[in-house]
Amino acid sequence: MEAALQVLVSGLLTGMGYALAAIGMTLILGIGRVLNLAHGGFFALGAYAAFQTTVWGLPAVVGAAPAAAAGVVLGAAVERAAVRPIRTYPLAAAIVLLGVAILAEEGFRLVWGSTYRSVPLRLPPLLIGQVVVSTEQIGGAAIAAVALGALALFLRSRPGLALRAAAADPEIATLSGIDVGRLQTATFGVACGMAAGAGAFLSPLLTVSPTMGRVPLIISIAMVVLGGAGRVWGTLIASLVIGLLSTAVAFYFAAAWSYIFTLLVIIGILVWRRDGALGRAER
Amino acid sequence: MSNRSLAAAPRSAKERPLVTPRQAAWCFAPLILAFVVQDRFTLAVLALAGVQAFFVASWDLLGGVSGQVSLGHALPFGTGAYAAMLLSGWSRWPPAAAVAGGALAGAAAAALQGRLGAHLSRLSLALLTLATAEAARELSGMLELTSQEGTLVGGEGGVPGVLFPWNEATAARIIAAALAVGLIALLRVARSNLGLAMRTVREDDRGAAASGINVVRVRVAAFALAGGVAGLAGGFAAGLVGRATPSMLSLEASLFVLAAAGVGGLGTVIGPATAGYALTAVLQWLDLSGPVRLTIYAVLVIAVGLAAPEGVISIRGLGRWDRWRIRRA
């Protein structure tokens, strides 16, 4: 019973962390009409930033702010240079972003080397009843929840309305005077910043290595296709579900099976929902 | 868009010879090279280049001719490698039979990918192929078997089989001969009625269905044929090192194919094969490390994607100036 409770709590906390990355991806799909296969690269950037802050003796969560800022700037730059010129070709954009992801991996290898690193927990863990939770993870999930709450409020505001209009129909939005191109760049940047933040929050649970971004990429894609591309709340619920189920699979079977489980979720939903799974990306 | 459909309008199978003399010359160039070269290191390099050219050419039938861009073509390649090693190492099949078995296994794996994705859009299909190949790679790293000698094989170390009893010269020549035959076969398929159907489906699947083409069958056939050739290449690749490893199913292998096919020009079969051959030969000759190679592939993929996002399919056969103008437009 305690084990199940432990799995429930850590699954939900993990799902909350990944939700930040997945909702970023779903926003890019909804507003930018692009499948960001470089999302994992930004996640890894955040994890390395967290690693670097622990090297300096600070808790990993502290690395999240500079990581998110770097993610925003780099993400916007990638959007301008690599996505905007080919936005009307969703497949080419996805493939180019895959190339960017591989380049990022090699960049991490140059800076931090190929060695596998772990991010130590600097704050004492909490014991709630019979369940052990790391303070960093609670902090990360709380910050993720606050960030998502802020996003929800923003989407209800006037600029948020412009964003939703751009997602619903870019051409009509342009006709009503919305600078859709700029919105798309901003969304891409913010979403990449969210991925980097998620990477920083989740880094203590993961092994930090140059190719570590691939698993979070697949997890984010699974959450997006399960929750519905461009749907923030659907993606949030899907994130919690997948976070919970993959933690359960990792706990009761083996950690490697949870990755295969996530891949099977993607395959299953793509086959079942057909193109609905990726929303309007190719419409 | 209009330029594209004009230039890429499917031609009838009888309009041009199935294989032009120039294409035939390209098909046989590696074979001639394998007989001219005497140096053992170069021959080993050429053998590997031939295998990779095969792999890229098979992808082009799928991604170029039939327009189904796969990000997981490593799946049939790696499946072919594993099947060939299991057949040669465990069932003691001779190399030729083991490679043929690899081809069949590759065809089956790719046909599964194609069947699952037959109704999907290009982007969803790309994602589906990526996910299937990643799942296979992950499984290959986890599953372990006990061999007849009682040792544990599989996992990240891969499955050992039989090192094909060929020296460098024989290996290079056999592979180059297989490549020549295989490329001509691929070209003939691309120019056949089936190839015509593939190109029609690529340009407009609803139109193709309306004119009586069974779209799903054509798509799955493209996957199966391409997977068969990729499985053959995988069988050769594993036979050259005597082992099938999870890296043969990896994203890196799929990325290499994308880079080479993009550089060579999608849908031309010979172009991607030549690019794959040259790229492998040069990188192997220079003995560059894995990360450096991967960086080169990534840069090539980005450059090709930005320069010709619609695929270079349509602009073949036009003058350089026309190509430039189409790209600008």
Image: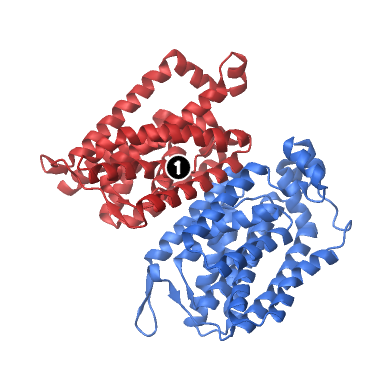
Chain colours: A red, B blue
Residue B225 vs residue A195, the one in the foreground: A195
- Say which residue appears at 71% left-offset and 81% top-offset: B35
Residue A152, given in percent of the width and then of the height, sits at 38, 22
Q: Amino acid at mark 1?
A: Ile
- Say which residue appears at 61% left-offset and 65% top-offset: B282
Q: Could you tell me which chain the residue with mark 1 belongs to?
A: A
Q: Quadrant of the C terminus of chain B?
A: top right
Residue A23, given in percent of the width and then of the height, sits at 41, 33
Q: Quadrant of the N terminus of chain B?
A: top right
Query: How many numbered marks have been drawn onto this rendered protein structure?
Result: 1
Residue A186, given in percent of the width and then of the height, sits at 48, 26
Query: Is B63 situated above or below B224?
Result: above
Left or right of B206 in this view: A8:
left
- Say which residue appears at 58% left-offset and 74% top-offset: B236
Residue A19 visible in image: no
Residue with the mark numbered 1: A221
